[in-house]
Structures are given as structure tokens and as C-alpha cells.
Image: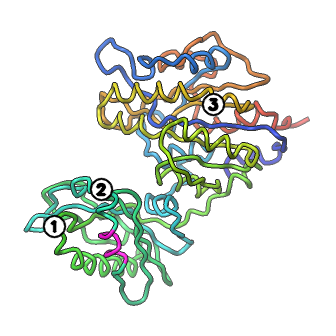
Amino acid sequence: MPHDYLTQLIQKNDTKIVLLVIDGVGGTPFTPGGPTALEAAQTPTLDKLAAEGCLGQTIPIRRGITPGSGPAHLALFGYEPLEFAVGRGALSAAGVGLPVKAGDVAARGNLCTLDADGNVTDRRAGRISHADAAPIVEILNSVQIPGVEVEVRQVKEYRFVVTMRGEGLSPELADTDPQATGVPPLLPVKAADPKAERTAQLYQQWIEKAFEALANQPRANGFNLRGFATDPGFPSYEEAYQLRAACVAVYPMYKGVSRLVGMDVIEFDGTHPDEEFAVVKDLWEDYDFFFTHIKKTDSYGEDGNFEGKVKVIEEVDAAIPDLMALEPDVLIVTGDHSTPAAMKSHSWHEVPLLLWARKNIRPDLETEFGDRVCARGGLGTIPATDIMPLALAHTGRLKKYGA
């Protein structure tokens, strides 16, 4: 159970908590002496909330550790990421609603392009479109081997997930993706534990048949696999916090991690912040906790597109009044990790944090929301796992500890 010490303290009430995650929002100056993307953005709404609330910064995993999106979100949800580990296969499967029960083994896959020698020339098959990749994924879904059931489902564009079901399977398999071009797309499947030998053999059989099935494809004629995993069996938000929780996110990965902690994942059309916030409005009476996720800040950061990241932050800021009109009791604005455009990748840098509460907030002296301002905010530098206890406390959902 995340934060076991909270169990005896939690009490229900009618308050509402919004966790707004601007993915990869933290950054570094794009040019020496310049601002970060968050500092360069014009954010009058976030600055007002910063003046009324309290700022700080979070460490997703540990100092100096660059986090993946899965463990970083688990930390935001209050699950210690070094204890509650989950493989990418299980995350991807959960993200598209593909059941992965204890004993099943799922892996995340990418379609790729191979040359005549069977070596990778493009790890993403030229970023093949979702529509063009769909029939190729269906070819993979038709590939079966004796003794197990295999199900393949498209995640997004060139990405897919493959799940194997049967008796005596184990996810203890070494990653097969060499993550390079000019080499074969897959290393041999090897068991990382003797109990996984049969599973390794079965996956190897399926891979060989699947490659035969794709041999005549002109573009996506191969694939790679990584992140073999099974259902981690996490306690749900209802069990851990007595919260009815909803996830409003566009990308499957974030839907997946939300499903794994028992949130209801809301399907909707739209990708813009104001479209996501309109979904929150429609659900307002049905839930206590709303996880709302903005992806494009991270995407632009990974592309090295500083101005694009700035623009998305400004779009979020312009839409936040729609959230505030719902009168949440607590609004938390942060990221899962930092994605500096100058680095074109996730990074280990601390993540800006804004805590706004309708009651019982102790504002600090800061009046704007920015990376370096957050570093001197009243909340200090805290583990990301501390966000949920702070949210619960500011909504009156925690009783006093001890006499």
C-alpha cells in the first residue's frame, strides 16, 4: 500500500482534487543566460495561482536519476517507484485496455524497417501513420503458436503491444531490443531467471513466425520488443486513498499507468487543453480526484523545439480558468519529470511544483511560476511521492496522527 502510515488517517469528505501534469514541464535555459521554457512563457493565470499558493520542486525518483514516464507518474500518484515497479509491456497493454492478468506476459513493440541483410534502417518504420500501421499489426495478431494464446494490439502509430497467455509463463526475460540501427532488430530472447526458460522459447518461436509474416511488407517489415512484464497488482486509489479517481489523458501510456492504480480512464475526442478540461467539467460530480495530463510539452522538449514547448505552456495557462471555474479545493500543477529542449530528452533536473488550495494554504513570497522561482518556494524540494499527502491534507482528508 503506498504510504501505509496514511491508512488510519484518511477520512472521506466532498472535496475535489485536480492534479494537472504538464509533461516534461521542467527545463534548463535553451541558450546560456536565457530563460527556461516555463520562464519564457507568458503565464498570467499560473502566476496568479503561484501568488495565492505555494511553490516548490520535486524529485521524481532520486537525485541525479533520469526517470522514465511510468515510474515518474507512479511517484506523482504516491507509489514509491523503486518499490512499485512496472514494465513497459504492462503499461502499454493497460493503456489500450488489453487485459494482462498475473501470469500473462506483455511486451512493448515498435514496427521498424529492415534492409536486405535484415538490419534496421529505421527504428520507427519512417514514423508510419496509425492508419497505415493498423493492418500490419493485424497481421502480427494473426500469428499464433501452440501452447499459448497471443494477442497483439496497436498502441499508437508504429507502436504495439503483444501479450502471451498460458500456463507457467514468467516475465523474467532480458530485453531484446538493441536500440540501434545497422544491426538486427532483435537479440535472442533469453531468460533472466531459470523459471522463464519456457517463456523465452515461446516468445522466440512467435517472433520467428511473426517475422516471416512481415517479410513482404515494403516499409514495416520488422519489429523490436522490450519491457516484458506482467500485472504488478498495485493497490488502487480507492484502497489507498478512498478517492474516486479519473484519468483524462490523450496518450495510451498515461492511461495505462492510471488503470494500473485503479483510476477510471475517460475516453474522449480532442487533444487541446481546453478540450481536456471540458471533460473534467462533465465528470465533476462523479469523482473526487482528477488526473489531467498534457503531453505536447514533453514532445516538443524531446524534439528540441523550445518555442513549441513555450507555446503549449501558454495554451495550458489560457485554459486553466476553465478548471478554476469548477472551484476545486486543491489544484496541483507540476510535471512528471523535466525535459529540457536543449537536451532533447528527459533529465534528472528537479520539477517545478505549484500547490494551490481553497483553504488552509500558507502562501510563500513568490508571485510567478518558473523553474528557478520554484527552487526557492515555500514547499522546498520534496520527493514527488509527497504530493498526494499534501493534497489530502489541504482538503481535510487526513486526521491527526496520535493523541
Disc nearer the start of the sequence (1/2): 2
In this view, 38 is above or below 183? above
Residue 271 rendering spot, x and y as whole percentages: 47, 43
Q: Residue at x 24, y 58 (%)?
A: 178
In this view, 129 is above or below 397? below
Query: Image check: 63 left or right of 139?
Result: right
**Element type at mark 3:** helix
> For the residues marked 3 and 2, what is the alpha-carbon distance in whole angstroms?
33 Å
Quarter of the image for residue 284 reads top right
Disc nearer the start of the sequence (3/2): 2
Q: Which residue is mark 3?
A: 322
Q: Which residue is mark 1?
A: 218
The answer to whether the residue labelled 1 contacts the one labelled 2, judged by CB atoms less than 8 Å apart, is no
Disc nearer the start of the sequence (3/1): 1
Callout 3, which amino acid? Asp
Residue 50 rendering spot, x and y as whole percentages: 61, 18
Query: Image check: 102 left or right of 394?
Result: left
Q: Which residue is mark 2?
A: 129
Q: Residue at x 18, y 55 (%)?
A: 122
In this view, 75 is above or below 145? above
> For the residues marked 3 and 1, what is the alpha-carbon distance in whole angstroms?
47 Å
Q: Residues within 10 Å of mark 2 (few under 14, many from 20)?
A: few
Q: Residue at x 53, y 64 (%)?
A: 97
Query: Image check: 175 left or right of 79?
Result: left
**Element type at mark 2:** loop
Residue found at the very far bottom of the displayed protein: 146
Q: Which residues are magenta?
A: 135-141
> For the residues marked 1 and 2, what is the alpha-carbon distance in whole angstroms?
14 Å
Q: Residues within 10 Å of mark 3 (few under 14, many from 20)?
A: some
